Amino acid sequence: MPVNVFGPGLRINHFGLIVVNSNAKIGANCDIHQGVNIGQNHGQYDVPTIGDHVWIGPGAKLFGKIQIANGITIGANAVVNKSFTQENITIAGVPAKQIKEGCTAQDEPNCPQKGEPVHL
């Protein structure tokens, strides 16, 4: 996928500031909430590559030359500064770490963003 392109099916949930580096790559059918920052670390091209069907919670920060696999759910206010290459997991925390396996945004009733407490 070329830089500065969102895949088809992008959904921006709620009104608010979203910052995305112009060199970031974001896959198809992703959900991005308010207050999200997807940015560089050091160099111009040290930016995230985000897979398809990724749910990015409010206030999450993703930065650096990292890979986010398909189907990952990123919790609110998470700071993601390393790659997560396993698909269909939930990550959260500062810094982000895996908290759940086999959970995607399509499984909403079973995912933390539906009000379930997250224990890190």
Image (cartoon, rainbow, N blue to C red):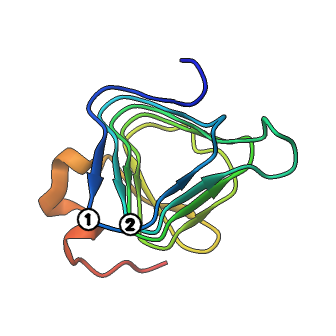
Would residue 39 be found to the left or right of residue 105 on screen? right
| Amino acid type at image mark 2 | Gln
The answer to whether 55 is drawn above or below residue 52 in the figure is below
Mark 1 surroundings: few (<14), some (14-19) or many (≥20) residues within 10 A: few
Q: Nearer the viewer, residue 116 or 35?
A: 35
| Residue carrying label 1 | 14
Q: Helix, strand or loop at disc 2? A: loop
What residue is drawn where x is 65% and y is 69%? Answer: 95
Where residue 101 appears, as percent x and y from the top left, is 38, 51
Residue lying at 34% horizontally and 41% vertically, measured from the top left: 30
Above or below, 2 against 85 in this view is: above
Percent position (x, y) of residue 112? 28, 69
| Residue 25: image location, x then y, percent | 56, 32
Q: Residue furthest top?
A: 1
Which residue lies under the disc numbered 2? 34
Q: What is the quadrant of residue 85 in the picture?
A: top right
Q: Is residue 45 left or right of residue 72?
A: right
